[in-house]
Amino acid sequence: KISMKLLTVQRRESIKAMLLEKESITVREVMETYDVSVETVRRDFDALAGEGFLNKIYGGATLKKRTSYVPRELSDQIFSEEKERVAARAVRFMKPGDTIFMDHSNYVFRMCKGLTALNMEFTVLTNSLQVLNELSKCPKIRLIAVGGRYDANEQAFLGPTASGFLQQFQVDRAFFSCKSFDMKRGLSVADERVADMLRTVIACADQPCLLAEHSMFGKASFAWFGSFDDIRYVFTDRKIDDNWRNYFSRKHVRLYECIDKDRTDEPDEDDVEF
């Protein structure tokens, strides 16, 4: 329960985060979480329904249009600690002289702090303005910016120019995230420009590495960009069920369940194979 009442705008943003995580919430749940009246919750739901964010149902609300755009600031609030664990585990794959691609997702951006702390020489290709700004603080990291049209909402360079530029390169590993995935069709995102970019990234990476949270499993979004036949590693924040574990095994995908934030052991002997 949140002990201090929030301003209306703060509470509604927090309700959005709850819905993005859980996809459905009840009026009672919101009342107890934010210590507000049923009338207040109904006004909040009315306002968010007017924004096209949720559908009101009897006794609660459900998330509307999972394929729609979600502001980066809001997306970054969700599963913050889990993102840190996954990013920290992915950083442990780095070796001196590596060439990697980093996309513009919140997950991958969280790798920057760990990469800078390595004080190691390697090359990074990225379409993310945030990644460029952060890694530019480390002179040992060679940065190559993926050009294209800049999207202020995504804080990234996207479009055919960016995808075409990437086709010139081959990288050891590509680190990226997505919006959702299922066993039938594979990986998807909300934006076809991002899908085109990631399709190109997977093709030019020896080891495509997906950073994913548990809420992405078993869902579908607007634009498909790849199958798990093309993915080498999956890093996720919780233990997954046996159906997914067996599926990854059949696809020869190496799984890392990043559960313990205090784990400091070295990578397994076969973590990095070149």
Image (spheres, rainbow, N blue to C red):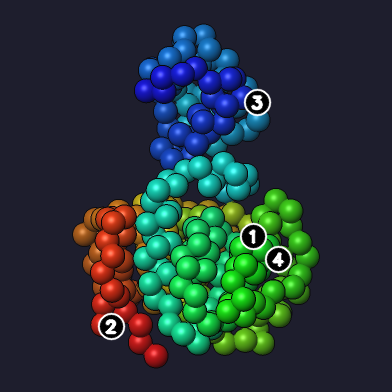
Return the disc, 1 or 4, that comes first in the chain's sequence. Answer: 1
Task: Name the front one of labels 1 and 4.
Answer: 1
Q: Distance between the residues labelled 1 and 3?
A: 32 Å
Q: Where is residue 178 in the image (x, y as percent from the top left)?
A: 51, 60
Q: Name the residue under label 4.
A: 158
Return the disc, 3 or 2, that comes first in the chain's sequence. Answer: 3
Q: Distance between the residues labelled 3 and 2?
A: 51 Å
Q: What residue type is labelled 1?
A: Gln
Q: Mark 1 points at which residue?
A: 130
Query: Would residue 183 appear left or right of 20 to someone viewing this image?
Result: left
Q: How far apart are marks 1 and 4 (CA)?
A: 14 Å
Q: Which amino acid does label 2 sit on?
A: Asp
Q: Where is residue 120 in the image (x, y as percent from the top left)?
A: 49, 79
Q: Do tag 4 and tag 2 residues touch (Cβ < 8 Å)?
A: no
Res. 50 mark: 3
User: Image point 62% across, 80% down: which residue?
Assistant: 142
SS at mark 3 in the image:
helix
Q: Which amino acid does label 4 sit on?
A: Leu
Q: Residues within 10 Å of mark 3 (few under 14, many from 20)?
A: few
Q: How far apart are marks 4 and 2 (CA)?
A: 34 Å
Nearer the observer, 95 or 86: 95
Query: Would residue 96 appear left or right of 105 to someone viewing this image?
Result: left
Task: Name the front one of labels 4 and 2.
Answer: 2
Furthest-left residue in view?
A: 242
Q: Position of residue 2 (x, y in %)?
A: 41, 23
Return the disc, 4 or 2, that comes first in the chain's sequence. Answer: 4
SS at mark 2 in the image:
loop
Q: Do tag 2 and tag 1 residues touch (Cβ < 8 Å)?
A: no
Q: Residues within 10 Å of mark 1 (few under 14, many from 20)?
A: some
